[in-house]
Image (spheres, rainbow, N blue to C red):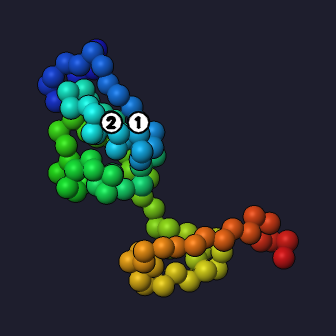
Amino acid sequence: MKIISNLCFKSIILTTSTPTLQMAIKKIHDIPLVFSVVADPVLAGAGKSFEYHLPHVTGISTMGDYAGMATVQCGIQIPEDFYNRDHVIVVDDSRDSTQR
């Protein structure tokens, strides 16, 4: 039995992606949800902010500095308005960049 917020629960639901978290939030309201591998849980519907979340939902965000990673890994400079765009096309050259 797991103790959460001074309440005892016999069940707990673990989700490991944004789609499964979103489905669980819509369907389950009386069992604690613990998420992982979710880049932006606020955008996924887990709460209004990292501090103010649904009372039965908690977890670990994998949000990262994607623009910084692209710059370091590929030498690509991401424009300031990148995240305000409606569509983004990603082209992946999977060859090892050290062999060019």
Look at mark 1 in the image and give the residue it sits on: 15
Residue 2 vs 76, above or below: the answer is above
Image quarter in which the N terminus is found: top left
> Mark 2 Cα within 10 Å, few/some/many (few <14, many 20+)?
some
Q: Residue at x 56, y 83 (%)?
A: 77
Asked where in the image residue 34 lies, by quadrant, the reply is top left
Cα distance between the residues tagged 2 and 1: 8 Å
Left or right of 62? Residue 93 is right
Image quarter in which the C terminus is found: bottom right
Which labelled disc corresponds to residue 85? none
Residue 68 vs 10, above or below: the answer is below
Q: Is residue 5 visible?
A: yes
Instruction: Say which amino acid is labelled 2.
Output: Ala
Q: In front: 91, or 10?
A: 91
Q: Residue at x 58, y 73 (%)?
A: 89
Specify which label sits upstream in the sequence, 2 or 1.
Answer: 1
Q: Residue at x 27, y 15 (%)?
A: 10
Q: In front: 17, or 63?
A: 17
Residue at disc 1, secondary structure: strand
Residue 75 vs 63, above or below: the answer is below
Q: Residue at x 25, y 54 (%)?
A: 50
Q: Is residue 68 visible?
A: no
Labels 2 and 1 touching (C-beta < 8 A): yes
Query: Which residue lies most toward the right here?
Result: 99
> Mark 1 Cα within 10 Å, few/some/many (few <14, many 20+)?
some
Look at mark 2 in the image and give the residue it sits on: 24
Tally the numbered discs: 2
Where is residue 17 shown, x and y percent of the image?
45, 43
Instruction: Say which amino acid is labelled 1.
Output: Thr
